[in-house]
Amino acid sequence: MIPTPNLDHISSKDYENVYEPAEDTFLLLDALEKDAELLRNEIAPCISLEIGSGTGCVSTFLGKILGDGKARGFFLARSLSFLQEHINPYASYITIKTGYNNSQVQLESITTNLANGLLPRLYHSVDIICCNPPYVVTTSEELYSSKSVIERAWAGGIDGREVIDKMLPLVDELLSDKGVFYLLLISENKPNEIRETMKNDYNLQSKVVLSRLAGREKQSILRFWRDIRQ
Amino acid sequence: MLQCHAKNCNSNNYPLQLSKVEVVNQETEFNPMFLRNMLPKLEWNALVKTAFQINVTLPNALPESSTDELDEEFLKTLHRVLLETHIQQGQMTCPNCNHVYHIKDGIPNMLLDETEA
């Protein structure tokens, strides 16, 4: 059992500016823990990336899974937003702090938007990618006009898919040959359709690692990987 | 690993040139296996250039020997540059269009103004 990262350094005031870990976050943590052996022994990552890191809770947890105090490679955390004005620099700052406050898991944080900065340099170089995207079904307008930082952390537009669909091609570009990508989805996001697309367009295999009901939401963690044997 | 992505800036935009840097060293455990795995992911020339800007000299060419035989001395230097050296404050300037990206509290900000994006 790996303990949930300690977030005591984050105040309720901070949570006005950064998404507070909730059921979805914890499901992602549980899925990573379930895959701990795979991540540690087979993937043994050099570069891991969390897209939309919020408090940095997931990256920190992943750091703990991968090793106790050993150099476990680079952890990058970056914003998920594709809208420039939606970027939350505050999350970059909290992310690093969370890593540091938990046995000094070293995280590197970058403030950037979804598309820029890492490619083409990290083309097919990232071994673990995690993402808890804004998945809640809203109107497109709600997504584009959301004023609060927190609303932006969950508003996903039509089918809750507008941000997710922008991200998927980038995942293909970033993921290394042995890499794995973890994505949180709810049933309204049509996970099977996403799995189909990833298979057909990018030859990425997938599997549901964990599913859980949170209120009315059926949340699942999917793992994608490259089918390079074919 | 970061490059300039300002509009129409498509060539000679890497590596970004460091200036006004404030570096913090933070010791971490030495892990030769990780460093060996990391090597193929690095763009060596860019790393040499960047390291030189913070006063660390790396060999211009990767040592010839196969990765199993890389000497300890070399790996230790690499460890120091990659994992223990943290740029807390500074600027990164694009060698082509001179756009300046800032690093604040260890976080590079790669955002552009709307006119540049």
Image (cartoon, grey):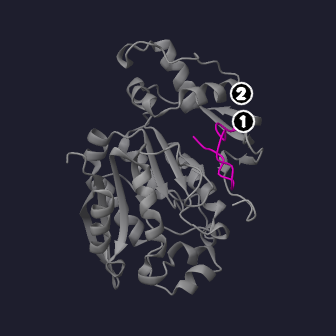
- Mark 1 vs mark 2, CA separation in Å: 8 Å
Q: Which residue is mark 1?
A: B17
Q: Could you tell me which chain the residue with mark 1 belongs to? A: B
On the image, the x and y values in percent for residue A206 come to: 25, 60
On the image, the x and y values in percent for residue A192 come to: 26, 73
Seen in the picture, residue A81 relative to A40 is either above or below; the reply is below
Q: Could you tell me which chain the residue with mark 2 belongs to? A: B
Q: Which residues are magenta?
A: B1-17
Q: Which residue is mark 2?
A: B53
Q: Is residue B54 visible?
A: no
Seen in the picture, residue B94 relative to B29 is either above or below; the reply is below
- Residue visible at 59% across and 57% down in the picture: A9
Mark 2 Cα-neighbour bin, 10 Å: few <14, some 14–19, many ≥20 = some
A225 magenta-colored: no
Q: Earlier in the sequence, mark 1 or mark 2?
A: 1
Q: Are marks 1 and 2 on the same chain?
A: yes
Residue type at mark 1: give it.
Gln
Majority secondary structure of the magenta segment? loop
